[in-house]
Amino acid sequence: MRDKKKARPATKSQLHPRNKHRQRYDFPALISSCPELTGFVADNQYGDASIDFFNPDAVRCLNKALLKHFYAIDGWSIPKHNLCPPIPGRVDYVHYLADLLATSSKGSIPTGKAIRCIDIGVGANCVYPLVGASEYDWSFVGSDIEAASLRSAGLILAANPQLERQIDLRLQTNKKAIFNGIIQADERFELSICNPPFHRSAAEAKAGTQRKQTNLKASVKHKDSLNFGGQSNELWCPGGELSFIKNMIIESQQFSAQVLWFTSLVSKEANLKAIYQALKQQKVAQFETIKMGQGNKVSRFVAWTYQKPEQQAQWLLSS
């Protein structure tokens, strides 16, 4: 017997107002853009069309359909072992970054290719540059320590030649560096973006996945797989998220005149206190914490700049 259908909101009101994914998934429309999604869509226990979100193949195909339908991205594909991000949450980060730039520009969101962003850890999926270029026509540099991930991202760009000149991929050869070796002496960026590795070790990453699957009552069929995939450098690093962000803050001082706003997602709210202390030690001119809501989860990113408000406005006037 089918479970009694629950009343569900028509919109995901916690997402950013400009987020194109506030409505429930329109599977017929998505299938029209990506016919292969048909094989993963079926009625769930409430009689709604859906996919099995614990099936990595289904999630990858849904992402492909979303990127094609809403952002005109062709041929999006990633290796099975790489991180497959939830698109709505990634899109929220981009829109809140646009709002952040607006605070430095008298409330007007700067758009166009002259606005340059650097994505630290662009990964095989290249989602932030793809969405940022589509929504705001920004230009991107995407860096990563994994050559294989950059090859995957490069294949996505090759399938979308309209973006190849707008998104530049660079290999970070020094695994202890973040901006060094990537930002060149004559470059300026309006934004840096980062989704840092959260866990401190492979064992911690595995335990976290198991807890998540237990809490969400994952299906037996996919109980041994990660919700959205991911390999070592995408999921963990020595010291975890906090160590990574503190290192980023220290290194950012060297590029204080080349990047207007540095930002990073912060998964664990308890890490904010130590992050604020690190920012104060670097004597940044301003820092903000921007909260975002996705489903039952509240996420956030921290942003900091070495430029005072009048310098921020002048910076964007000259971009």
Image (cartoon, grey):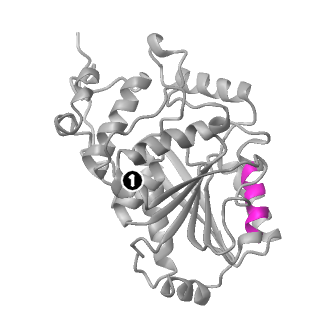
| Magenta segment boundaries in residue numbering | 244-253
In the image, residue 141 sits, relative to residue 173, either above or below, namely: below
The N terminus lies in quadrant: top left
Membership of 100 in magenta stretch: no
Any part of residue 125 in sight: no
Tally the marks.
1
Q: Residue furthest right?
A: 281
Q: Main secondary structure of the magenta part?
A: helix
Seen at 47% across and 82% down, the residue is 105
Front residue of this view, candidates 27 and 318: 318
Q: Is residue 251 magenta?
A: yes
Point out residue 17 in the picture as x, y percentages from the top left corner: 34, 60
**What amino acid type should be assigned to the residue bearing mark 1?**
Leu
Q: In the rendering, at what x and y percent does residue 106 appear?
A: 45, 85
Q: Which residue position holds label 1?
A: 15
- Residue 239 visible somewhere in the drawing: yes
| Near-viewer residue (211 or 116) | 116
Q: Residue at x 75, y 31 (%)?
A: 201
- Residue shown at 45%/59% (left/top)? 94
Element assignment for label 1: loop
Percent x, y for residue 84?
48, 35
| Residue that appears at 22% across and 27% down | 48
Q: Position of residue 209 (x, y in %)?
A: 59, 26
Q: Residues within 10 Å of mark 1 (few under 14, many from 20)?
A: many
Residue 214 sits in quarter = top right
| In-image side of 317 versus 199 (left or right) | left
